[in-house]
Amino acid sequence: MSRESSPTRYPDALGDMAPMDVFGPEDADTALQAASQVLAWVEAELGLAS
């Protein structure tokens, strides 16, 4: 399971650490880029791309 999805499934996955102490701006940028790529693919598959 990925580092990003474990804490959402298992509340104790980060132990005593807060998410802000584990994930940084680079992680957010990477996640946004991946989400944008997935969204673009879905829109293209559904014929919604402009």
Image (cartoon, helix red, strand yellow):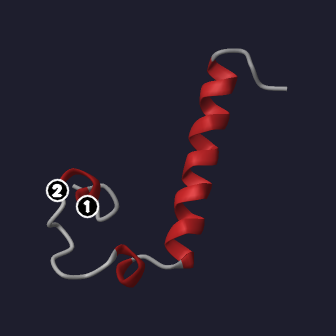
Q: Assign a secondary structure to mark 2.
A: loop
Residue located beneath label 1 in the image: 7
Which quadrant: the N terminus? Answer: bottom left
Indicate whether 25 appears above or below 45.
below
Q: Assign a secondary structure to mark 1.
A: helix
- In the displayed image of the protein, which residue is found farthest to the right? 50
User: Disc 2 marks which amino acid?
Assistant: Tyr
Q: Where is residue 38 in the image (x, y as percent from the top left)?
A: 56, 39
Label disc, if present, on residue 26 of the rendered structure: none
Question: Splitting the image into 4 quarters, where does residue 4 fall?
Answer: bottom left
Is 28 or 45 nearer to us in this picture?
Answer: 28
Q: In screen coordinates, is 48 left or right of 9?
A: right
Count all numbered tags in the image, as a single digit. 2
Q: In screen coordinates, is 28 left or right of 9?
A: right
Crowd around label 2: few <14 · some 14–19 · many ≥20 (10 Å)? few
The residue at 56%/77% (across/down) is: 25
Which quadrant: the C terminus? Answer: top right
Q: Position of residue 40 (x, y in %)?
A: 67, 35
* Mark 1 touches mark 2? (CB < 8 Å): yes
Label disc, if present, on residue 10 of the rendered structure: 2
The residue at 49%/71% (across/down) is: 27
- In the displayed image of the protein, which residue is found farthest to the top? 47
Indicate whether 50 appears above or below 7.
above
The residue at 74%/19% (across/down) is: 48
Q: Position of residue 28 (x, y in %)?
A: 54, 67
How far apart are the two marked residues, 1 and 2, measured between alpha carbons?
5 Å
Crowd around label 1: few <14 · some 14–19 · many ≥20 (10 Å)? some
Is 40 or 10 nearer to us in this picture?
Answer: 10
Q: Where is residue 12 in the image (x, y as percent from the top left)?
A: 14, 66
The residue at 42%/76% (across/down) is: 23
User: Disc 1 marks which amino acid?
Assistant: Pro
Q: In screen coordinates, is 5 left or right of 10?
A: right
